[in-house]
Image: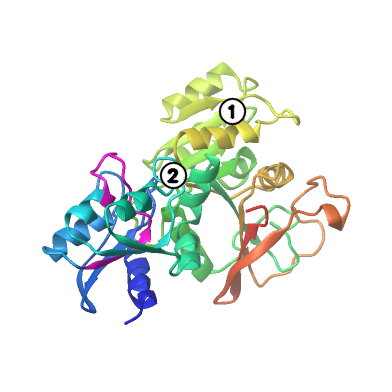
């Protein structure tokens, strides 16, 4: 079998865990004489790395080739480094998909392997491996999480009807996908306007939920009631605000179980969203998914803070008057924010389309 066959199996393994943040998704397959002798995925922080588990499963890995989706590390972290373990086990060759951009790795793992007589090949199914770890790679390169803007839109680009109603633009199949995506991200974020209008819980529902993402409410002035549903579902809640929010309201949020983060005001007197994304980076989050509303989405786009667009088009048309994305400072098509198509799929009568900011 080919290198691509074994690497594809490593990628399949890496995708099995539902959540590994702030660590990357990694799969490893050990092969000797054309047969798999050990295979594993990394399960997340505190768990052994995929290479170590695969070595343990193999028992004897002398003369084997290790197919791994990400460069093996050579530094000591929470768990022992993988590159020395592969050398000590007698692995003859490592075939890796991509280099790890983490400053503690960044080619050092490959250098260690080569200096100890292990042959190294890099680049097998590189695009597939990079797509799988797009949020991790972005966070390690920029220090910020990947910001995904998820929008449910009518066919004519509206976020809701004229009266503000938006339940339901999309149908059940699309909603199941949204809940599955919530389980994959570190946090789900909405603006105060969405909380006031829709009172969302922002939890993972309609599927088996192994974890709940953190929930972030962006409220610059204190409009969110401490009795809102977002405070009631037993998961981490963060209200991000400014000094414009009354002290009593901030205290009420804390008493409702939320962490309150006060950030500077931006140019529009709302929250400085650049500072907000930096705050997420300090928490080592890999991906934050913004689910609205229109005001927050517009500001994120205007500030060029959206890394990916995840659009769910429902088969409805509402005409003029309904809310849509507002002014993002573009007056000419030459100045438009540009996004590259990543994937699209049909979900019953709806369509999901994912785009990536072309600055990546």
Q: Could you tell me if the residues under marks 1 and 2 are in contact, i.e. CB atoms within 8 Å?
A: no
**Coloring basis for residues:** rainbow
SS type, badge 1: strand
The residue nearer to you, when weighing 139 against 219, is 139
Residue that lies at the very extreme toward the bottom in this rendered image: 1
Principal secondary structure, stretch drawn in magenta = loop
- Which residue occupies the foreground of this view, 201 or 31? 31
357 on left or right of 186: right
Give the image quarter of residue 142: top right
Comparing 335 with 78, the one in front is 78
Secondary structure category for the residue under label 2: loop
- Say whether disc 1 or disc 2 marks the residue closer to the N-terminus: 2
Q: Can you say whether 348 is above or below 138 in the image?
A: below
* Residue farthest to the right, as pictured: 332
Q: Is residue 165 above or below residue 345?
A: above
Depicted 80 relative to depicted 266: above or below: below
Residue at (24%, 49%) from the top-left corner?
84
Q: Position of residue 220 (x, y in %)?
A: 64, 29
Q: Nearer the viewer, mark 1 or mark 2?
A: 2
Residue at the spot 50% in from the left edge and 56% down from the top edge:
134
Residue 346 covered by magenta stretch: no
Bounds of the magenta segment: 64-83
Task: Give the residue at x 53% y 45%.
Answer: 141
Give the residue at mark 1.
Answer: 241
Residue 243 in view: yes
Q: Which residue is mark 2?
A: 102
Q: Residue 158's x, y, as percent? A: 73, 59
The answer to whether residue 84 is left or right of residue 26 is left
């Amino acid at each position: 079998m080919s290198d691509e066959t074994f690497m594809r199996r490593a990628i399949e393994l890496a995708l099995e865990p539902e959540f590994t943040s702030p660590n990357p998704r990694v799969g490893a397959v050990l092969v000797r004489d054309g047969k798999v002798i050990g295979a594993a995925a990394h399960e997340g922080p505190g768990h052994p790395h995929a290479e170590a588990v695969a070595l343990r499963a193999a028992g004897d890995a002398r003369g084997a080739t290790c197919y791994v989706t990400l460069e093996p590390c050579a530094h000591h972290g929470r768990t022992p480094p993988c590159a020395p373990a592969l050398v000590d086990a007698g692995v003859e060759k490592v075939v890796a998909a991509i280099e790890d951009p983490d400053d503690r790795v960044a080619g050092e793992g490959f250098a260690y392997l080569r200096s100890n007589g292990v042959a190294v090949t890099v680049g097998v199914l590189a695009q597939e491996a990079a797509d799988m770890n797009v949020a991790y790679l972005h966070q390690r390169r920029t220090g910020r999480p990947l910001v995904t803007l998820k929008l449910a839109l009518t066919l004519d680009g509206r976020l809701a009807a004229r009266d503000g109603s938006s339940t339901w633009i999309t149908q059940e199949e699309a909603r199941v996908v949204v809940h599955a995506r919530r389980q994959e991200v570190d946090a789900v974020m909405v603006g105060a306007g969405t909380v006031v209008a829709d009172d969302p819980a922002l939890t993972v529902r309609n599927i088996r939920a192994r974890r709940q993402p953190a929930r972030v409410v962006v409220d610059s002035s204190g409009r969110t009631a401490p009795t809102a549903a977002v405070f009631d579902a037993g998961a981490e809640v963060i209200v991000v605000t400014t000094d414009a929010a009354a002290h009593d309201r901030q205290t009420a949020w804390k008493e409702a179980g939320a962490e309150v983060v006060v950030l500077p005001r931006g140019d529009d007197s709302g929250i400085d969203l650049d500072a907000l994304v930096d705050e997420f980076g300090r928490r080592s989050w890999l991906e934050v998914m913004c689910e609205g509303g229109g005001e927050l989405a517009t500001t994120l786009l205007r500030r060029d803070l959206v890394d990916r667009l995840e659009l769910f088009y429902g088969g409805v048309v509402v005409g003029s008057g309904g809310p849509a994305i507002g002014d993002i400072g573009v007056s000419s098509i030459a100045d438009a924010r540009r996004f590259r198509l990543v994937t699209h799929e049909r979900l019953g009568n709806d369509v999901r389309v994912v785009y990536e900011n072309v600055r990546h």
